[in-house]
Each structure stands twice: as structure tokens, then as C-alpha cells.
Image (cartoon, helix red, strand yellow):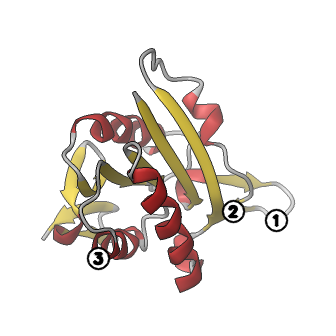
Amino acid sequence: MKIHIVTTGGTIEKVYSESSGKVENAASKIDRYLQSLRLPDIRIEVASLMNKDSLEMTDADRELILAAVRIKVAEAPVVVTHGTDTMVETGRLLKARIQNPQHPVVLTGAMTPLGFERSDGLQNLTESLLAARILPPGIWIVVHNQVFDVDHVRKDRENARFVAI
């Protein structure tokens, strides 16, 4: 089975910069983490579109995500790594503009960057790959061992989690 991963940045891809002393988006690192997973019957194709904090995404960035996902979802399930702050907004755009997707589209991200102690990134990435295999066609958010319909979820910033609405 094939799954497409479209990376856009967000906390899941952030790294600590010694020169600035900040955590920032520098370069995609999803490939490195995929190599640590045992995925014997799956072929993953990664497309890195951008590496931005989702609060910095523009309408043009979301159109780029839409164009990539629209093409890829016709062929196979898609996982989109995305910053959690505007993940729901991007998901709702995808749902509004991709009519009758052939496969599931799963958005995921992290509250703590991949590779940091107690990061939720690898868990969310792994769960999203499974979800992409078993969910019906549609637009979903998968995070912290939960699956949400993009129309019925919001980020609870105070508690650093997503909740159904």
C-alpha cells in the first residue's frame, strides 16, 4: 500500500537553533523519523511543500497544500504534517474544496517537536499512518490517540490538546 506524506512545517518539524537560541522551522526531518518505524507493507512518498509555523501560513500556502493534496488523494491516502494552531482551518479548506476524495486525508502535528523529550510527534505521525490505512475517505485530524472529523474539532490551547465540538 502507498501513503503520501505532505509536510508543511509546524512544531512537529521544529529544531533548536543554537545560533538564535530558539526553536524554529529549518528543514523537513520526517524522513529521519520514518526510518525508525517498522512499516513492512507500506510505501511512503514524502513531498515537502514548505517548513512554516502554521501561524505564518498565507492563503497562497494553503492553496499550495490544497493543490498537492488534491492530486495525491486521487491515488492514495494522504497524511499532512501541519502546525496545530491553524490545522483545523487548513483541514476545513481541504474539505470544502476537495469534493468526494477517493481516500482519507489525515492532518497531524505535534505540541512538542519530534526528537524533543516527551514529544508527541512520533506518536501522532505513527497513528496518522495507521489512520490513513483504515479511515474512510474524508478529511480527518489525528492527534493524541484520537480521530476527529475536521468539522467537529478545535484546538484547546490552554490544555494543549484537541477536543471534539
Residue at the image point whose x is 29% and y is 35% from the top:
133
Q: In screen coordinates, is 164 left or right of 65?
A: left
In this rendering, the answer to whether 78 lies above or below 153 is: above
Mark 3–mark 2 Cα distance, whole angstroms, equals 31 Å
Return the residue at label 1: 20
- Residue, disc 3: 96
**32 vs 144, nearest the viewer:** 32
The residue identified by callout 2 is: 24
Q: CA distance from mark 1 to mark 2?
A: 9 Å
Q: Secondary structure at mark 2?
A: strand
Please name which of the two marks, 3 or 2, marks the residue nearer to the observer: 3
| In the image, residue 120 above or below residue 27 | above
Residue found farthest to the right:
19
Q: Nearer the viewer, residue 154 or 102?
A: 102
Label 3 vs 2, first from the N-terminus: 2
**Residue 14 showing in the rendered view:** yes
Q: Mark 1 vs mark 3: which is more N-terminal?
A: 1
Disc number at residue 134?
Answer: none
Q: Above or below — where is 136 with respect to 158?
A: above
Can residue 116 be seen here? The reply is no
Amino acid at circle 3: Ala
Tell me which amino acid carries mark 1.
Ser
Q: Position of residue 62 (x, y in %)?
A: 51, 75
125, above or below 37, in the image? below
